[in-house]
């Protein structure tokens, strides 16, 4: 067999895997949405769809969208995956000024493009696109989807259609759009509805659904579009599990919320109390373990004393955490609500008790004032200690994701102490509770130890695998920007 290269394409037969991928490619619906979990072979199926007409129908063309350009060009992204398919079918790639594949004999084209902003769709004014593909449709806005639906037309003789992949996002417009196919109590797809066609029309901007195309069109005097949703999970992609058997373990190392979304396909799960952190995930031990290799106390600062005007102000919280053997231990928690002078005196006392072997960290507020506060604290209060300010980045929920993952996978233990009840009450209520000072201190301490662990080791440990996504683009509860983690056929 001729080896694959970019100049000498291989001719080989490509076919879908049986199951959801095959049903996706054979559905007669105008709009087919495919997915519901990571690893189901969604992107491969989307890339395969245009091949049925690209070499046989003159004038046929397709555009496949990702929300942002890097999601197309990143290693292992849409472009790399397309090379595995399109070179073998005689495709010729051009990457500038835009990414497009062309195919003999008619030079029909498949374009890849982004829709970073809502207004980006205006560049398609007047366009006629026979096949429109959305990879990760939940990342696109409702406006973008329906505007491009108006561009979904053709004179080549092939019925225009839209094909899309998706992962669950409980807060997206897409979750509402496909709600008929999803059990609204559990969040999981209803198996017997997978692949079933329904029709809709838009009346005054509102979507009206029906089980009959003719009934809708008679009532509203407009053309109805057919839609279906085809769920898929990692178990529907045996080739991926054969090629990369570690992939399931990667998903199982995620937090509870992310596992529900990306492994089990749950469209209702979101960050709520007892879903980010749950008391049952933390083993409580009777004494501090020996051999702690790194210890840090992380401070989340506040400076409002309890008063009649402020009956329930935030706390200043200092949480001490250590690590040994890849397990993280919550060793101590100190909280205080008082004026700035009393808080600084208390911090000095706690730091002296901890000793110079315990690192001291606190969140650095933005701007010049934040830098000045850290400089003065390092010069005056923490001279002789390993003290740093840590600039905050991302939301509180995003910063809590690595600790949530580790706790869910049994990697954080808590030393038994009188402060345990306050600790568990706040972390279980997060992010809906009145206070998040303890969670902020927990996240800060955990992320500091995790980053130290990664920087010191040449090879990743089990604990590192759980927390490695803290620096990835998708370290949030809902997968942004991309949690598909490289579906393959």
Image (cartoon, rainbow, N blue to C red):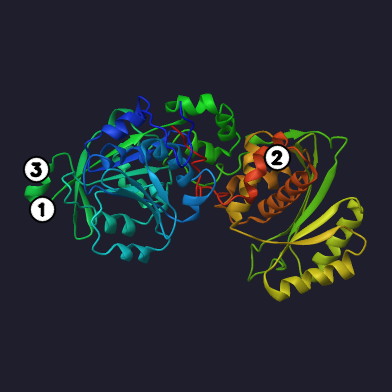
Name, please, the residue furthest toward the left: 218
Residues packed near mark 1 inside 10 Å, few (<14), some (14 to 19) or many (20 plus): few
Do the residues under discs 1 and 3 have CB atoms within 8 angstroms?
A: no
Residues packed near mark 2 inside 10 Å, few (<14), some (14 to 19) or many (20 plus): some
In the depicted view, which residue is nearer to us: 408 or 347? Answer: 408
Which tag, 2 or 3, sits closer to the chain's start? 3
Q: Quadrant of the C terminus?
A: top left
Residue 403 horizontal/vertical position (percent)? 66, 44
Q: Is residue 324 above or below residue 302?
A: above
Cα distance between the residues tagged 1 and 2: 57 Å
What residue is disc 1 on? 220
Q: Residue at x 33, y 62 (%)?
A: 121
Q: Nearer the viewer, mark 1 or mark 2?
A: 2
What residue is disc 3 on? 214
- Decide if residue 98 is on the left or right side of residue 442: left
Residue 442 horizontal/vertical position (percent)? 70, 49
Q: Is residue 247 above or below residue 446?
A: above
Element carrying mark 3: helix
Cα distance between the residues tagged 1 and 3: 10 Å
Quadrant of the rendered structure where residue 323 is?
A: top right
Q: Residue at x 55, y 42 (%)?
A: 275
What residue is disc 2 on? 464
Q: Give residue 5's mark.
A: none
Which tag, 1 or 3, sits closer to the chain's start? 3
Q: Residue at x 73, y 62 (%)?
A: 337
């Amino acid at each position: 067999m001729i080896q694959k290269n970019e100049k000498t394409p291989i001719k080989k037969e490509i076919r879908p895997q049986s199951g959801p991928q095959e049903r996706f490619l054979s559905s007669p619906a105008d709009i087919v949405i495919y997915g519901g979990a990571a690893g189901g072979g969604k992107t491969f199926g989307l890339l395969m769809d245009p091949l049925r007409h690209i070499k046989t129908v003159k004038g046929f063309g397709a555009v496949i969208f990702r929300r942002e350009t890097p999601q197309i060009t990143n290693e292992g992204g849409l472009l790399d995956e397309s090379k595995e398919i399109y070179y073998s079918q005689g495709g010729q790639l051009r990457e500038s000024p835009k990414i497009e594949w062309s195919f003999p004999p008619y030079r029909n084209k498949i374009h890849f493009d982004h829709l970073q902003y809502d207004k980006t769709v205006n560049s398609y004014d007047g366009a006629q696109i026979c096949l429109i593909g959305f990879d990760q449709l939940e990342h696109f806005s409702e406006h973008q989807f329906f505007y491009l639906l108006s561009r979904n037309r053709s004179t080549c003789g092939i019925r225009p259609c839209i094909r899309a992949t998706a992962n669950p996002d409980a807060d997206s417009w897409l979750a509402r759009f496909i709600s008929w196919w999803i059990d609204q109590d559990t969040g999981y797809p209803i198996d017997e509805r997978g692949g079933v066609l329904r029709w809709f029309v838009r009346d005054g901007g509102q979507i009206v659904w029906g089980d009959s195309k003719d009934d809708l069109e008679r009532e509203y005097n407009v053309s109805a579009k057919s839609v279906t949703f085809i769920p898929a999970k990692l178990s529907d992609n045996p080739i991926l599990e054969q090629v990369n058997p570690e992939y399931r373990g990667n998903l199982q190392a995620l937090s509870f919320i992310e596992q529900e979304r990306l492994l089990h396909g749950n469209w209702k799960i979101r960050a709520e109390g007892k879903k980010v952190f749950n008391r049952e995930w933390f083993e409580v031990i009777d004494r501090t373990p020996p051999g702690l290799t790194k210890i840090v106390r992380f401070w989340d600062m506040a400076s409002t004393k309890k008063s009649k005007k402020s009956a329930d102000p935030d706390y200043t919280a200092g949480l001490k955490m250590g690590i040994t053997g890849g397990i993280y231990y919550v060793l101590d928690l100190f909280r205080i609500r008082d004026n700035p002078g009393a808080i600084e005196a208390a911090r000095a006392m706690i730091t002296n008790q901890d000793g110079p072997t315990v690192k001291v960290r606190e969140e650095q507020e933005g701007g010049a004032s934040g830098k000045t506060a850290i400089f003065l604290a390092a010069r005056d209060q923490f001279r002789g200690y390993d003290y740093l300010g840590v600039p905050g980045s991302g939301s509180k929920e995003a910063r809590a994701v690595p600790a949530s993952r580790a706790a869910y996978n049994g990697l954080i233990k808590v030393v038994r102490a009188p402060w345990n009840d306050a600790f568990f009450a706040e972390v279980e209520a997060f992010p809906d509770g009145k206070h998040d000072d303890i969670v902020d201190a927990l996240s800060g301490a955990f992320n500091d130890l995790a980053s130290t662990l990664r920087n010191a080791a040449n090879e990743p440990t089990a604990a590192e695998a759980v927390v490695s996504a803290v620096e990835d683009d998708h370290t949030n509860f809902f997968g942004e920007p991309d949690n598909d983690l490289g579906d393959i056929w």
